[in-house]
Amino acid sequence: MESSELTFRRRLVSTLILWVLVLGTILSGYEQLFFITIAGIGLLGLWEYFEMLDRRGVPNFKLTALITAVIFLAGSFITFRSYGPEKSYDFEIAVLVLFLLVVFGRQMFRRTRDQNPLETMAYTLFGLLYIPWLFNFLTKIVYLAPRDPSGETIGQYYVLYLLLVTKFSDMGAYLTGSVFGRHKLVPHISPHKSWEGLAGAILFAVGGSFGLWYLIPDKLAVFGTGDLLILGVLLGFAAVIGDLAESIVKRSAEAKDSGGLLPGIGGVLDLIDSLLFTAPILFFYMRLVLGLPS
């Protein structure tokens, strides 16, 4: 078993490399590059999910789900970018309905009957909803935010805000829990999570929320002081829930990590687990509370 110091170093190197790639993608301003990055990460996370199921021997329709995810992510990007939220919702619902029809059709004509058909379809549908559908909210945030006077998108800075606040929450939970953690949060799911870590996650998230706004207030102009506080609390809490949700999935699949692509971190799904819950929170706050687009 490798030492905690070596694990920390590997995690630090992986994190720095990832932040360079993420910042380069966001600050480049190329919408297609941003989409390709988001879609690629989402598909890798979905692949890892099905790989965990395969190792456990859980039946699933992996190829069908991956093809559907590609159509879903690409079509949602095009419709949301071109026509706005309403058309995007129509497209996503149509894809999900088609997916259900295909999955039911495949199950009806399968020769193997020794596996529970409902189990096969449920695990497959869950993977599609849990990873690409939730992660796709990052792309939607880009086009929900108002454009600058020249017509260029600035929504990528709201994605940067989301990433920073979410990762501050993860860091706060880890540091505070390691130093002050005494009272277990949900030991049957994750023995290392503590109530002190949850408090630290929220405090760090609030600090990150105000910190980034202080640095680039003109890029995050739709947020007021109250929004920064509320979002810090909501996103900090949601990040912890997202981390615990993946722990449930990994425990069910009897896996320590979702994969081994990222040294010191694990898999792609281990990297984005918190974002799967914070991205929808930010999207719906901007849409329903702030009333965007307006």
Image (spheres, grey):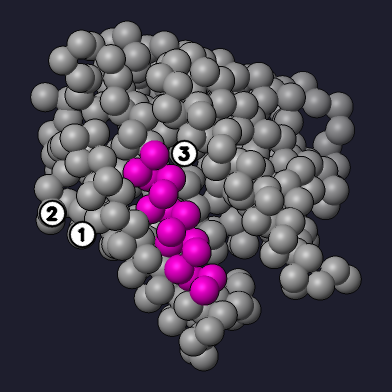
The numbered mark at residue 225 is 2
The amino acid type, in three-letter code, at marker 2 is: Thr
Position of residue 223 in the picture relative to residue 169 (left or right)? left
Q: Are marks 2 and 3 in contact (CB under 8 Å)?
A: no
Q: CA distance from mark 2 to mark 3?
A: 27 Å
- Which is nearer the eye, 50 or 229? 229
Name the element at disc 3. helix
Residue 291 vertical placement versus 70 (above, below): below
User: Which residues are drawn in magenta?
Assistant: 160-175
Q: CA distance from mark 3 to mark 1?
A: 23 Å
- The local crowd at label 1, few if under 14, some if 14 to 19, many if 20 or more residues have their Cα within 10 Å, is some
The residue beneath circle 3 is 134
Residue 98 vertical placement versus 166 (above, below): above
Task: Answer whether residue 130 is magenta in the image.
Answer: no
Residue at 52 percent across and 74 percent down: it is 175
Mark nearest the camera among 3 and 1 is 1
**Residue 113 x %, y %:** 83, 37
The amino acid type, in three-letter code, at marker 3 is: Leu
Q: Are marks 1 and 2 in contact (CB under 8 Å)?
A: yes
Q: Quadrant of the C terminus?
A: top left
**Residue 79 x %, y %:** 37, 12
Residue 242: in sight, yes or no? yes
**Residue 226 x %, y %:** 12, 56
Residue 152 vertical placement versus 39 (above, below): above
Residue at 45 percent across and 21 percent down: it is 28
